[in-house]
Structure formats: C-alpha cells, structure tokens
Image: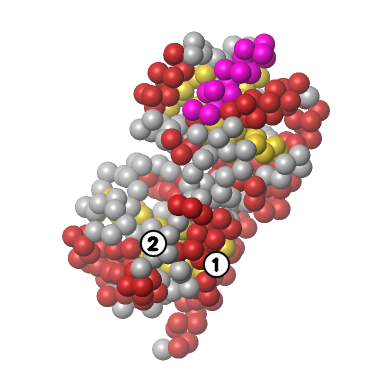
Amino acid sequence: MRVLHIITDSNVGGAGILLSNLTAGLETRGISCPVLLPRGSRLTGILKQSGAEVNEIDMTERSFSPRDMLRIAHEIKRFSPDAVHTHACLTGRIAARICGIKSIFNTRHCAWERSEIGRLSLPMRMLYEAVTDMTVATARAALSNLAQMGINMKKTTLILNGAGRVKSPSPGAKERFLKKYGVPPNSFAVGMSARLSPEKGQEILICAAEKVISDGFNAVFILAGDGADECRLKRLTLDKGLMGRIIFTGYISAIGEFYNSIDLHVNCSVGTETSSLSISEAMSAGVPSVVSDFGGNTELVTDGINGLVFPSGDAGALAERIERLISDPSALHFLGDAAAKRYDESFSAERMCAEYEKMYRATVGAKTQAL
C-alpha cells in the first residue's frame, strides 16, 4: 500500500516529528509513505533520516491555497498513491479528490478551548465532508473540537500520538551534555522541549523558575527549542536576573541526550496541545512530567500516578509542584517508573503505527471492494 502524506509546515513541530515516527514505523508494516512538503522545509532532513521518501515543491504554509492546487495535483498523479493523508492541508484533499483518489485522510493535530471553536458554515462542512473520508484526532480534546465544528463524527477516529523510545545514554553522555550547556554540577535539571511560542507557555516556566530559585532550590531550567518568541523570552529571563539558571539550547536534533540529562520534564501549554510527543518521549526515558491541564495533557499524565498536573497558566502552582519533587527524590523516582510503564502501555510509536495500519487497511480495503 502507498499513502502519500502532505504537510505544509516549513519548521519543525509536533506534526512533523509525528510524521517522522509514522513513516518509519509503517514502512516495516508494508505501507510506503512518501511525503510532500514545502521547498526548504526544516522537516526534510528529519524525514530523510527516518527513511521517508521526501519530495519538496513550491507551496505555501496555508491550509487552503488555490495557487498550489495544480502543483499538488501534479504530484498526486505522479505518485499514483492508494490514499492521500493530509496534515491540515485542505488544498491537498481537494486536489486528491479531483485526481480521483478514493481514500483521503486528514489529521487534527491541535486542540483549543471550547470558547475558541465555532461551528463551520454549511458550505465549509459540505466541502470538508466531500474531500475527507476519515479525520484522525490526536486527543479527545481534538475530537471534541471536531464535534463543535460540526464535522461528521462517524468519519472520525481517535489515535493518540506515539513517540519513539529514547535510547539509554552512553557512559558519560549526561555529564557531557550538561557541561556543553553550562549547567553547574549537582544542579537539579528541569527541562522543557517545545517550540518557543506563546501557546507553549515558556513564560510561565520562567516565572515559576524565579519562585523556585528565590526559595533557595539548586535548580537549573533548560529550554530546548527555537521559535519566534525566543528574543522576548531571553529578554524576560535577563530582566529577572535568571541568565545562567535558565538556559536556552536552541533546537536539539539528538533530543534523546536532552531527556537523558534532565531530572524533571515540564509541559506548560496554554494552547494547541493534544497528545504531546515531548511528554511521551520523557516517559520513555523514565523522566516524570509536571504538565498543565490544557488539552490532551491529562490523557497522558494522571496527577499523582505517573506525574503531576497544575492549572494551566498558574506559575505559582507549577513552582510548588517542582519544589515538591526536588524535595522528595523517592516520589520523583516513583513517578518516573510509572511514566515509563505508561509509555509502554499506551504511547509507543509501535502502538500508534499499528492503529494507523488498521485504519488504512480497513478504509482503503473497503473503498477497493466497493469499486
């Protein structure tokens, strides 16, 4: 089976990392997944490393762009896939239907507060229905958003994101990583891996770090990632006098080194989060997470069972939970072990790929039999 994936992202984000995990895993299951994406996208290298066939074309990052229609349609005809799977690219789905593709999938990678989601107009719902045979929601929060939008729920399915297992560190790897980024010896390392963007909530972590440090805890906060909010966040850190205690690493390609070097992982999202790959990756390394209660975070982390949860946007509550775990190494260890077990049960890339394979074979097979 051949499934052409179309993604419009030019930068590295959760959807792109998910696609990397998915293409690699499905290849071993007899499903080839070439990827179509914008020319010059930073995802190209990551996808090629995973073994994906990557094809760049001149296309915009917008979900709907009429000027991209002919170029995408040309590529679809060239690949002649059994199915097309878009990642928020409406243009790709319209082009696929025009090209006669019988099985068209779309993934909803984000979730918003109920007050921020409105019902699509009737013409938009009709268009969505006409060009989408199945929509994948990556969290129950995303599934709820689809229902609010008026999407036909009989043509939706829930598949939680899965992450590849972080490899065990080689001898001395943690020490080398911490030294590289200037982390003082014997510090408690709190880490966050996310695009530097307001909805990811790094500002909340910086405010929480100020409280933890002022309370006398020997903690360092490592922010992995880059993005449009980088300058503002660094200025905020400088203004609070926290440079050296808050460390910005930029984008880290070998992200396993990051997870193997931190003591605690945090997710401070205030928007878009579904089933966070950073939480899953931390789980696989046996690192517990303190997460906001936004979106799909609580589908991964159960408070007090395999991590801790705090009210979204509440820096004081986040600081309290970080201090609690710094002060109680046995609780930290217990939650880390439980997180690793939770990963094995529900959030591995293998589990995710098996669910996508089942969906593809059922939907494409049904369409083929109907011909």
Q: Earlier in the sequence, mark 1 or mark 2?
A: 2
Is residue 277 shown in magenta? no
- Residue at the image point whose x is 76% and y is 21% from the top: 327
Horizontal and vertical percent for residue 161?
Answer: 56, 53
Is residue 217 shown in magenta? yes
Q: Secondary structure at mark 2?
A: strand
Colouring method of the image:
secondary structure
Quadrant of the rendered structure where residue 42 is? top left
- Give residue 86's mark: 2
Task: Tell me if mark 1 has few (under 14), some (14-19) or many (20+) residues whose alpha carbon lies within 10 angstroms of its own.
Answer: some
State how far apart marks 1 and 2 are (Cα). 15 Å
Horizontal and vertical percent for residue 5?
Answer: 39, 60
**Mark 1 lies on residue:** 157
Amino acid of disc 2: Thr
- Residue at the image point whose x is 50% and y is 34% from the top: 201
Task: Locate residue 205 relative to residue 330 in the image: left or right.
Answer: left
- Observer-nearest residue: 125 or 59? 125
